[in-house]
Amino acid sequence: MMDRILCAIDGSKAAQRAVTFGIALAEKCNAELCFVTVSTVSQSSAADSPFWDTKLFDAGEALIERELGDAMREASGSSVKASCATISGRDIAHAIVAYAMAEGYDHIVMGSTGHTAFGRLLTGSIVDDVLSQNHPPVTVV
């Protein structure tokens, strides 16, 4: 039984499909839904880096807020009890799984671009990294 669903988003078209699917799944299962995104740069690490400045960091934070806001607006048109969270971590897949396990989510929804095996070999895949860990059930959209 699914009571708490975590939907990982990153602003991509694949993530948008995951949002739509996650809302429908949560509605069907009468489950809570949380949209989560991972920030790989913290304000303190950005301050110590020659590559980041305040404007660049703030622009990244604004993008995260927009992505989560878009997901929440889509969920507001349904009966789903939705929330959102931003988590930090250098390893995105590990951060998603660790958050799901620590917060008691019993299902993860993620989007995939549908890369070929060769494409995944070259570029890697957060979905593949999540699936290689001990995790709650995962639906890949």
Image: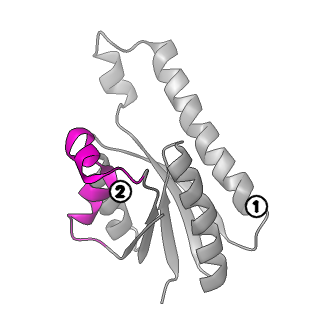
Specify whether 23 is left or right of 43.
right
List x then y, in percent, for residue 18: 54, 60
Instruction: Please say whether residue 121 is one of the residues in the magenta stretch.
Output: yes
Q: Which residues are magenta?
A: 114-135
Image point 57% across, 67% down: which residue? 22
Is 104 left or right of 98, judged from the image as shown? Answer: right
Cα–Cα span, label 2 and label 1: 23 Å
In this rendering, is residue 37 above or below 141? Answer: above
The picture places residue 91, in percent across and down from the top left corner, at 25, 45
Residue 29: percent from the left, percent from the top? Answer: 60, 84
Q: Residue at x 63, y 38 (%)?
A: 66
Horizontally, residue 17 falls left or right of residue 77, namely left
Q: Nearer the viewer, residue 15 or 87?
A: 15
Badge 2 marks a residue whose secondary structure is helix
Q: Residue at x 68, y 54 (%)?
A: 72
Q: Counting other residues with Cα less than 10 Å from the Cα at mark 1, is it few (<14), some (14-19), or many (20 or more)?
A: few
Q: Residues within 10 Å of mark 2 (few under 14, many from 20)?
A: many
Q: Secondary structure at mark 1?
A: helix
The single residue placed furthest to the bottom in the displayed view is 1
To which quarter of the image does residue 104 belong? bottom left
Q: Amino acid at mark 1?
A: Ser
Q: Is residue 100 above or below residue 47?
A: below
Residue 128: which quarter of the image? bottom left
Q: Residue at x 50, y 27 (%)?
A: 60
Which residue is situated farthest in the top direction here?
50
Can the viewer see residue 113 in this picture? yes
Q: Amino acid at mark 2?
A: Ile
Q: Is residue 88 above or below residue 24?
A: above
Q: Which residue is mark 2?
A: 96
